[in-house]
Image (cartoon, rainbow, N blue to C red):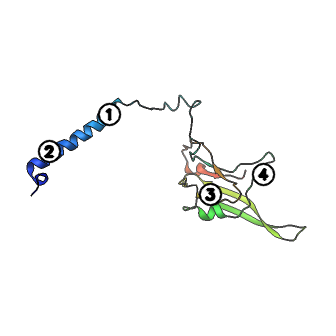
Amino acid sequence: MSFKNTYIGTIVYAVKSLATGMKVTLCEFFTRKVTEHYPENRKTLKISDRHRGVLVMPHDDEGNNKCIACGLCQMTCPNGTISITTKSVTDEETGKSKKVLVEYNYDLGACMFCQLCVNACPKGAIEFSNEFENAVFDRKKLVLKLNK
């Protein structure tokens, strides 16, 4: 029978464990705190570039986006937050049919920000922005139409 399994050994082990916890607590007590005073420092707040806030679809000056309506983002989304509506349009010159994006809906309330949709997009048509103030009273307002 070892000393650790005895009554006195258990007490010694408990005191050592308590001393270790108190040491960690005292070290944290004297370290400098990094508290953000959020609403007051909104203008000077620096958010990391890697922060995933809201999925956006950048548009150029004419209002066009890079989306080719392939549906890869919708297929790779693990919980179905992206829904794409497309239609087939036949090109008059070549006679070939082509998919055209009609509606791109994104449910921010169900998104888990995994970035699989952004990685799957072959044209880089969608990306995450740094916007983080998304509080609303009605969950229906979290369903966004990205191709405005």
Q: Earlier in the sequence, mark 3 or mark 1?
A: 1
Disc 3 residue crowd, few under 14, some 14–19, many 20+, Cα 10 Å: some
Q: Earlier in the sequence, mark 3 or mark 2?
A: 2
Q: Secondary structure at mark 4?
A: loop
Spatial CA distance of label 3 from label 2 is 54 Å
Q: Secondary structure at mark 1?
A: helix
Q: Secondary structure at mark 3?
A: helix
Amino acid type at mark 4: Asn
Q: Earlier in the sequence, mark 2 or mark 4?
A: 2
* Image point (60%, 63%), residue name: 76
Residue 75 screen position, x and y as percent: 61, 65
With 95 as the anchor, is 48 left or right in this view? left
- Residue under pointer 3: 119
* Image point (49%, 30%), residue name: 37
Q: Which of the 4 quarters of the picture holds residue 88?
A: bottom right
With 136 as the anchor, is 85 left or right in this view? right
Q: Residue furthest right?
A: 93
* Residues at marks 2 and 1 touching, judged by CB atoms closer than 8 Å: no
Q: Nearer the viewer, mark 1 or mark 4?
A: 1
Amino acid type at mark 1: Cys
Spatial CA distance of label 2 from label 4 is 71 Å
Residue 53 screen position, x and y as percent: 58, 46
**Is residue 145 positioned above or below 28 on the image?**
below
Q: Nearer the viewer, mark 3 or mark 1?
A: 1
Q: Earlier in the sequence, mark 2 or mark 1?
A: 2
Residue 64 marker: 4
Spatial CA distance of label 3 from label 1 is 42 Å
Residue 27 marker: 1
- Residue under pointer 2: 12
